[in-house]
Image (tube, rainbow, N blue to C red):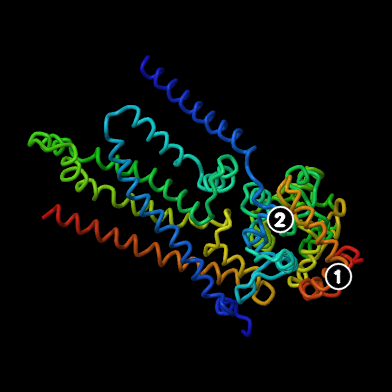
Amino acid sequence: MRKIWIRTIAIISLIASLMLVLAGCGNSSSASSDNNSSVAAIKKRGTIRIAVFGDLPPYGWVNKDGQRVGYDVTLARKIAKDLGVKPKFVQVNANNRVDALNSDKVDIVLANFTVTPERKGIVDFAKPYMKVSVGVISPKDKAITSASQLQGKNLIVTKGTTAENYFTSKQPKVDLLKFDSKTQQFNALKNNRGVALADDNSYLYAWVKNNPTYTVGIKSIGPKQYVSPAVKKGNKSLLNWTNKEITKLNKQGFFTDDYNAQLKPYFGSEVKPSDIILPQK
Amino acid sequence: MAHSGINVLFEGTNFTRLLGGLWTTVQIAAVAIIIGLILGIILGVLRTFHNPLLRLVLRLYLEFFRIVPTTVLLFLFYYILPRQMNIHLPGPQMATLVFALWMAAEMSDIVRGALISVPKHQRESGLAIGLSRYQLYRYILIPQAFTLELPATINLITRIIKTTSLLMLISVMDVINIGQQIIEANNQHYPTGVFWVYGLIFLLYFLIDYPLSWWANRLEQKRMENIND
């Protein structure tokens, strides 16, 4: 009997000490990491690592020839070109965008990253290049037109999106059904796993255009929000450069061209460029 | 049927891209399985020794990899450890490492189980004729344990191959990830593309996993015949 106790205590203390060692390592080394993503470091390396979506037409997706294209990707290529380096794309999902930045897997995130107060605490956002708000789609014959209709029902969202954030914090009575990717969330809606689906409204307009049995019942819910490039917290060098770049691109009318080339074919006439892009000076 | 969903597979370079993704999957799984097998056998043999400290450490290692879900392991190794310890490995290498360690952990238990279920008189006879510990394992225990561990090992290998579908999480462009890209890119023209893309992925996984089970069955039967002769 006594032997068993001694062994149990030994095992527990071993595990505890292991955890302490791990935690200790963390504290000592995280403070001393260099900035691998400063403008100088990127230029020296000759490539900029950019996190983009791979399954979100028309923002970031892969065409049938295997090339990455889309509104965000066009901006990404422009940024790389203006830095004089090659772009290296890293495909992310909505819920690993922050981790990709913080663990130095990418230099900048251009994956439809909406600015929120919570996210501002963990990454640095540059000037916005797009605006959005949360919309809700539902089948036309059972259209959801106000948030009160959603109470106690399943609403489909993707993990880590603004839609998930908004409904978790502001509409706690709505039951959320969360998925890992855009592909999964739309399949879930088609299979009637929930009564409606919430996501960025600009994206929903595009999807509804291709799926005419659904409608954007709630066009905009919650506050108007902006989409910005994001860099690792404290990466002032790349942040300042990106801010200047966005100002410059605004002056050149780059985003209007980008809208017309990438987004217009998807959104059709229901959406105007001024609904999506910011005023071009 | 101008827009039959199956055409989605043959548009542009879609098919070759899927095969490319499959190649990534196979590479990661194969390297992980080979490393895991070798390491697992060594650890399994070590676990039958009577050194209590060694046993405890190996036991903890096994339990850690058996209990923690693979999703969490991948996340931990790819996003959290690099931040804490400044180790930087690209996604595919990191995935190979995680799968190899996982394979080794589970393999060590299979090997240990098989070694201790070799009849006791075999070990004792070996010792009686003066074999050293190395010779005992090399000529008596390991060959006899091999048959016993075969079914469980094949089962583990097929599990490893299937679980590579989680690689999407750490930005590795495996066959599932590329499948999703194709589905989303073609949703407009091929609403039923989902079925065909996943159907093909199912077929590809089946083509990899089925020969393994078949081969395992055959090996087992052969061994049985040898024993019963």
Separation of marks 1 and 2 at Cα, in angstroms: 22 Å
Q: Residue beneath label 1, please? A: A252
Looking at this rendering, what residue extends furthest in the top direction?
A: A2
Give the structural element (helix, strand or loop) at label 2.
Answer: helix
Q: Nearer the viewer, residue B170 or A150?
A: B170
Tell me if B125 is positioned left or right of A50 in this view.
left
Q: Chain of mark 1?
A: A
State which tag comes first along the sequence, 1 or 2.
2
Residue A84 lies, with reference to residue B168, above or below; the image says below
Tell me if A99 is positioned left or right of A164 in this view.
left
- Number of numbered discs overlaid on the protein picture: 2
Q: Which mark is residue B182?
A: none
Q: Residue type at mark 2: give it.
A: Val
Q: Residue beneath label 2, please? A: A39
Residue A257 at what x, y percent from top left?
A: 82, 73
Residue A76 at what x, y percent from top left?
A: 72, 64
Q: Residue type at mark 1: give it.
A: Gln
Residue A202 lies, with reference to residue B98, above or below; the image says below
Tell me if B113 is positioned left or right of B172 in this view.
left
Are the residues tagged 1 and 2 within 8 Å (C-beta)? Answer: no
Residue B68 appearing in the image: yes
Residue B200 at what x, y percent from top left?
A: 50, 70
Are the residues under marks 1 and 2 on the same chain? yes
Q: Nearer the viewer, residue A224 or A206?
A: A224
